[in-house]
Image (spheres, coloured by chain):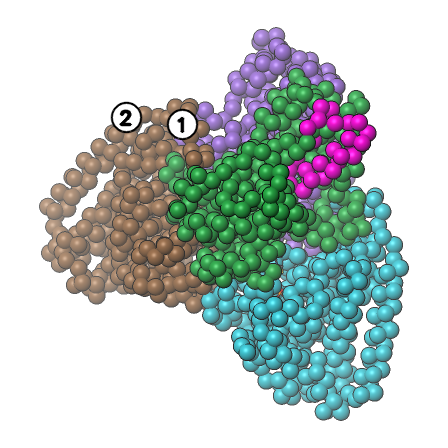
Chain colours: A cyan, B brown, C purple, D green
Amino acid sequence: MTIRYPYTGEGARGFDRFAQSHSGAKLLGLYRSMLRIRRIEEEIERRYHQDQMKTPIHLVIGQEATSVGCCAALGETDLLYSSHRTHGNYLAKGGDLKAMLCEMHCRINGCAGSRGGSMHLIDKRVGMAGTSAIVGGAVPIAAGAALAAQMKGEDHVVVVFLGDSTTEEGVASESLNFAALKQLPLVFFCENNFYSVQSPLATRQPARDLRTWAASYAIPAVRVDGVNVLAVLEETQTAVARARSGGGPTFIEAPVYRFRAHGGAGDDSRTGYRDVAEREAWERVDPLTLFSGFLMAGGMLDERATAVMEEALAAEIADAFELALASPIPVEADLYRHVYAD
Amino acid sequence: MTIRYPYTGEGARGFDRFAQSHSGAKLLGLYRSMLRIRRIEEEIERRYHQDQMKTPIHLVIGQEATSVGCCAALGETDLLYSSHRTHGNYLAKGGDLKAMLCEMHCRINGCAGSRGGSMHLIDKRVGMAGTSAIVGGAVPIAAGAALAAQMKGEDHVVVVFLGDSTTEEGVASESLNFAALKQLPLVFFCENNFYSVQSPLATRQPARDLRTWAASYAIPAVRVDGVNVLAVLEETQTAVARARSGGGPTFIEAPVYRFRAHGGAGDDSRTGYRDVAEREAWERVDPLTLFSGFLMAGGMLDERATAVMEEALAAEIADAFELALASPIPVEADLYRHVYAD
Amino acid sequence: MPWDEALVNSLVYDKPDPGEGRVSTYVSAVREALTLALEHDPRVFVLGQGVDDPSAMFGTTRGLQQQFGSQRVFDIPLSEEGMMGVSAGAAMNGMRPVYMHNRPDFILLAFNQLVTHAAKFHFMDNGTTDVPMVVWAAIGRGWGSGAQHSQAIHGMLLGVPGLKIVMPSTPYDAKGLLLSAIIDNNPVCVFEHRWLMKKDGVVPEGLYRVPIGKGVYRRRGKDVTIVGASHAIELGAQAASLLASEGIEAEVIDLRTVKPLDEAIVLESLKKTGRLVVVDTAWMKGGLCAEIGCLAAEKGFADLKAPVCRVGLPDVPTPAGYTLEQFYYPDAARIAAAARGIVRV
Amino acid sequence: MPWDEALVNSLVYDKPDPGEGRVSTYVSAVREALTLALEHDPRVFVLGQGVDDPSAMFGTTRGLQQQFGSQRVFDIPLSEEGMMGVSAGAAMNGMRPVYMHNRPDFILLAFNQLVTHAAKFHFMDNGTTDVPMVVWAAIGRGWGSGAQHSQAIHGMLLGVPGLKIVMPSTPYDAKGLLLSAIIDNNPVCVFEHRWLMKKDGVVPEGLYRVPIGKGVYRRRGKDVTIVGASHAIELGAQAASLLASEGIEAEVIDLRTVKPLDEAIVLESLKKTGRLVVVDTAWMKGGLCAEIGCLAAEKGFADLKAPVCRVGLPDVPTPAGYTLEQFYYPDAARIAAAARGIVRV
Ligand SMILES: Cc1ncc(C[n+]2csc(CCOP(=O)(O)OP(=O)(O)O)c2C)c(N)n1
Ligand SMILES: Cc1ncc(C[n+]2csc(CCOP(=O)(O)OP(=O)(O)O)c2C)c(N)n1
Ligand SMILES: [Mg+2]
Ligand SMILES: [Mg+2]
């Protein structure tokens, strides 16, 4: 049994510091948002083998606190760019579940008209601005979005999610440099889940602190416990405030763990690239159970409230799937639309 | 009068620390090597307007101490990769002057058969291994050469020269990462002359210490006075020893100044991108006069010895130009050679 | 007057060029287009390595930073891929970047952002994102440019859906096409050629557009059609003069845009001449020469009376020395010889 | 026995395939080639994202790290351009890297190193540097690969001097061409296709080479020539069967190598049939379809009896949904229809 990448955060104790800054309703809202993502992901996973969703999936089960904590610090006009691992970001940013599931079922009313698939979930009305299926692809684009905001004197900020392996792409370094040079209103949110597909960080980078990488561009760089939704919220708020007030970019590294395979349904730890024990160790700090435990202990949540939540979510999710499955598929003429903008 | 990038080294005092480690002959040899590059560059410059050398040139006048100091720490089997600014590296590494000038006159007996031009000077017999006219292009190639040496268990090391702007290319970051990961026998030698063509560093990077960039990959990173040939030699020796003994890569930053335009003959400071006063300030720490002053003060060099040196160099250079101008040009069939290796 | 309205009201010349009027250089024409765009549209900005330096991108950006400020005309780090992504991102968010490169070779560093991102986002986003950006570069040739500083890359990009590519050959087109490119709501590559930079020509003042996707006759003839763009069609026109003195009447078509291609004009000419020489500044294999040659075999087959000829670069990297370059680059004589060969079939 | 000698003595089959013998899958054939190369030549090494992971690059690298050690078979950082340069640098210094990619799309990040460095160094160095490297990738299709994970990029690379490109369609060729690519002293791109990975075929054991630059007849016929490579010619062969049932005898040429192209076999067939359908897994514009269509118009003109037809992708990015993909990718029926159309001219 080898735990190559242990959890090093504070666990449940980590919530105390932050909780008093938020109303009970706010805290419950955060929990509900995480739970909603979890349940949606589980349902996608459950149905995946039915082959109705002919699209790659990259589940975020285990990584809900980063999306939810980060997006809670953003307004609707703030923009979020994402990588292939889109589901959590899309939902946390307020993306339309129905449009997402329609997209994943390759329907014409999908959020990208069935042209983008699960790696290209967008919902511009809520600032889910764009994604790339190319590792690192969204990073300079997000910097460009931040440059546009700066040039236009708009006060929204831009957040870009990147994985640990994305830091190895040259373009990520180029983007840090440019963002620092222009003091762009941009937050680099790095979800370090220690793996790129099935490759551990240690086979891809020397032993180092990722923060030093960003700091070498004179960018404030912090680490935050990625399973603690409140800590994530707090750090993102600081970064967003800095960006919004003209203080330039911030780099946030959040160690997290994905409980499932890189892509597809189920976990693949048993294939040997990581130890099942490692996943199990992280499952003991599941961001949901950790936070619900905290809420329960504080009397903000109980079994009954949870059941009500679950029920509503189950209904919403069932509805959305039903709609997706009943939605029309595109016709041939749709293929030729939108190759060029008018 | 603005000196944006002042010299911050120790000037002539900087030699004392190192001189005793070397014989008088060694010291004179280093001086002669720098002087030779200077005189060759001056002659190239003088003749450039005659339009016999139909090739871009990137003179190293002012930057001789880096090439010479670095190469003095290398053996003939150690490899050097370079950028567009090749002249100094090629000569210091022991490249054949005649073959260089033939190349610059587009002759068939040029070191690259007239296919490479001045940005592609190579001389494999002495380890001048390759260059790229693309900024950053040679950096990962040098890493590949170092990987090959490591895999084959050969004990040579590889040095790659890069300019300050090269550090902005994503591929340079990628190369640092890979070199650190594999602990390659590689030295990154960064000549920071503060400009990329006519763009000052400040318009391209945030205010930062370049060493932190390399250090963020857990690579030992040092700064050395780039006008002090002995300091450069010493730091390179340390780096080479580390690389040769399996200790992995080193990053050396050497602040230097180019006294001429980015490309072509003459200085272009009067066009306004940098202040003439800045160049003049650096000319006061010209690596040649600084070192000859030191040698003269120590009684190792005098007017007569200098004159003898100058005379021999002048003859060598005149000869080489004569040969180049008398050399044959390629014929049409040469064009189709070496597109593919057999 | 806002940009859009000004442009709607601006002239679109269908003629090759206005024939007479103010003469200016190619470089001034480009600078004028940039100036007008910056003046009329606050969304336009110009970025590129050294656009604000004394060399000013061949002079095309001279004075622009002084006039429009360093927010709108600025130098950038040596980060081709990153800055292509930044440009795309800015374009997706309401700006209209003009990203200038000294040489197309440097765009190869940014193919991922150009090909897989900028060109495809509009489609992937189901039409909800526009990417109105211009990627400008001048093809290098001569004086030791060599294998790494002389690549004409438009042939590689013909198969990229979502991109447009223009390649002007006259100062008039350089201005009008650049304005069209900036106004276009898609990523448009503008490939200039270094050897055209000093050329003079009639360039009307003020706003006008040369339409993207429309070729133009540079010369009328009935014996053979010479098709190409940029510097290659300059040579094509010279070749036509040579041929004229021998009694061969060549028709010369300047494509001006290579993607989307004006197939109609090529096919129309072929109907008359039945003979085709395709000229290009790039390699002959798999690029523009191949595309137009194939077009003739596909849609112009019934009219073809002789084999199609390509005149471009051989399947060899560019040598750095002028001594080898002389054998490498085709000239008017070589184009004329190709035409002669098929006219006599 | 050292590699070189073993290979000199190895068989080079000129036949399409040996007809009978051991049957194995495409994936095993690739793995066998890698295994043999690693066994015979200490200079060979295999690198790529995840080559040592449980998915093992579709299974093609399964077990190789266990067998040959992590010095010779290793995972790499997500740094496509950097690792392309590392591969080139190692190749220039006596090694023979095989750099594997899950998808050709990722190679677009490395075009600068591939096109401007690896392909050109031998020429620029006047023949003193060899760059014996293999760049391997499998073209994606279906299951939501979409615009960014399905690009066939060989068309973009046809105009790059110094490169070779092979695109096998059978397990037999996959093994023999990969061995040839590894032995070749130049950068060779090997583009596989995901839909071929599960295919079975006869694959002899031990070393053998399929020559680079040689196409092969998959079927003989006299009415029309169908030319292509990789998965496209699979479909071409199916189309030929459909046509046969209608009395149309199609000749099917599998190019196997797309650069350098076996022009002779195409022209030879054209002499007989006078009719040409070019099929490709990539976009029709400016790529392989265009190159071969132009070749016919250029060197096969006298034999051409009907317009050339291209069957490949329309000028549209790849949609992610199967619902649109069904209209996007041509199938055997579409190829047959194209052939029918020109046979009846
Ligand atoms: C340029 C590029 N290289 C490789 C891939 C294949 N790929 C898709 S996701 C992925 C892993 C990315 O890891 P990371 O950035 O850490 O994000 P995570 O999946 O862990 O969330 C890889 C290698 C890709 N999509 N793009
Ligand atoms: C990828 C790329 N971009 C731009 C250029 C044009 N260019 C040639 S040299 C140079 C400046 C390089 O500056 P630096 O690396 O600091 O080296 P220096 O010239 O100062 O020695 C530039 C921008 C190039 N050759 N390659
Ligand atoms: Mg990861
Ligand atoms: Mg510099």
Residue C57 shows in this picture: no
Give the quadrant of residue D345. top right
- Residue furthest to the front in view is D21
Instruction: Return the residue nearer the eye: A84 or A42.
Output: A42
Amino acid on which the number 1 mark rests in the picture: Asp
Region rendered in magenta: D220-249
Q: Quadrant of residue C15?
A: top right
Q: Nearer the viewer, residue C319 or C41?
A: C319
Q: Looking at the image, which is closer to me, D338 or D273?
A: D273
Write the residue at 71% across / 46% down: D317
Q: Quick one: label 2, few (<14), some, or many (20+) residues within 10 Å?
A: few
Mark seen at residue C203: none
> From the viewer's perspective, is A231 left or right of D129?
right
Q: State which chain disc 1 sits on.
A: B
Q: Position of residue D84 (x, y in %)?
A: 50, 50
Which mark, by number, is residue B326? Answer: 2
Q: Is residue D238 covered in magenta?
A: yes
Q: Chain of mark 2?
A: B
Vertical order, A179 against D334 (above or below): below
C303 or B297: nearer the eye?
Answer: C303
Q: Residue visible at 74% across and 38% down?
A: D238
* Quadrant in which the N terminus of chain C appears: top right
Mark 2 is on which residue type? Ala
Disc 1 secondary structure class: helix
CA distance separating discs 1 and 2? 19 Å
Which numbered circle lies on residue B334? 1
* Snapshot quadrant of residue A71: bottom right
